[in-house]
Image: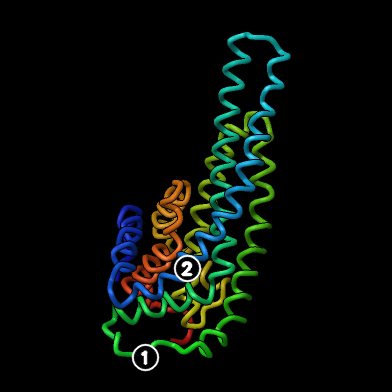
Amino acid sequence: MNNPGFVQSAGYVAKGWRLVRQPGLRRFVLMPLLINLLVFGVLGWWVNQLATAWLDSFALFSQWGDWWLVRALQTVLHWLVSLVLVFSLAFVFTLVANLIGAPFNGLLAERVEAHLLGSTSTPAPSWLTLVKSVPRLMWSELAKLSYLLVCIVPLLILQFVPLINLVAPVLLFLFGAWMFALEYMDYPLGNHGALFKEVRHTMRKRRKVAYGFGSTVALISMIPLVNLFIMPVAVAGATALYVDYLREGNLTRA
């Protein structure tokens, strides 16, 4: 089966939304949703304080006078910093929420796959099964975190390099989209034994899929309140992508 294009892959986020509202899957969405509410609530309050102080620092331009060029520079930098801040924090929030909710996301991916394949009669995993999956999922999340730190530090440094910082937010967004795709595709692939490096290899061969799906998740993650629902929706959408296009070419044991 041919891989979907950018637009078709982006549409799987909407498919994920439809899936999580199915009667047989709703109960598996509750825990990821509660985790998101907790993480966004606590960190959101702290970040609001941080963002206010950071953006207020642009007042330093006032000492350069009231020239139109100074005002234009201040406006451009204000928007660039705001964009970088909003996107970076949306990504950090999602990363923390996924780290906490990894076992439940893995369970949700498993049940969505069973639903799509018509295997809903399969008994739901017990709490013991869920506990046994924790080491694998935590190891995978740590692998993602290591990969993130290695890649994102240079991108963040570029935000402060003159001229380059005009395009640096775009580079940061593209990396974020790539990372979101890896984050959520890891759940259905990981349920079949794929390691994070194998997930990266799989998605590198399907860049349109990765950027179509990941860009949509990234954009939604920046919308207040709506982003509270993105984690279970993205897990379900990524699982549907796996079932429709990746299942037959799975690199590891089923």
Characterize the local packing of mark 1: few (<14), some (14-19) or many (20 or more) Cα atoms within 10 angstroms.
Answer: few
Quadrant in which residue 2 is drawn: bottom left
Q: Is residue 8 visible?
A: yes
Q: Residue under circle 1?
A: 123
Determine whether the residue tagged by mark 1 lies in a helix, strand or loop.
loop
How far is disc 2 from disc 1 in space, using C-alphas? 20 Å
Which residue carries the number 2 mark?
A: 32
Please report the residue visible at 67 percent of the width from the left and 35 percent of the height from the top: 54
What mark, if any, has residue 223 been given in the picture? none
| Residue 200 place in picture, x, y as percent | 53, 67
In the picture, the quarter occupied by the C terminus is bottom left
How many tags in the picture?
Answer: 2
Vertical order, 75 against 120 (above or below): above
The amino acid sitting under disc 1 is Pro
**Quadrant in which the N terminus appears:** bottom left
103 or 196, nearer to the observer: 103
The amino acid on which the numbered mark 2 sits, given as a three-letter code, is: Pro
Q: Nearer the viewer, residue 34 or 88?
A: 34
**Dividing the picture into quarters, in which one does residue 241 lie?**
bottom left
Q: Which residue is at a point 60% across and 35% down the rendered structure image?
A: 81
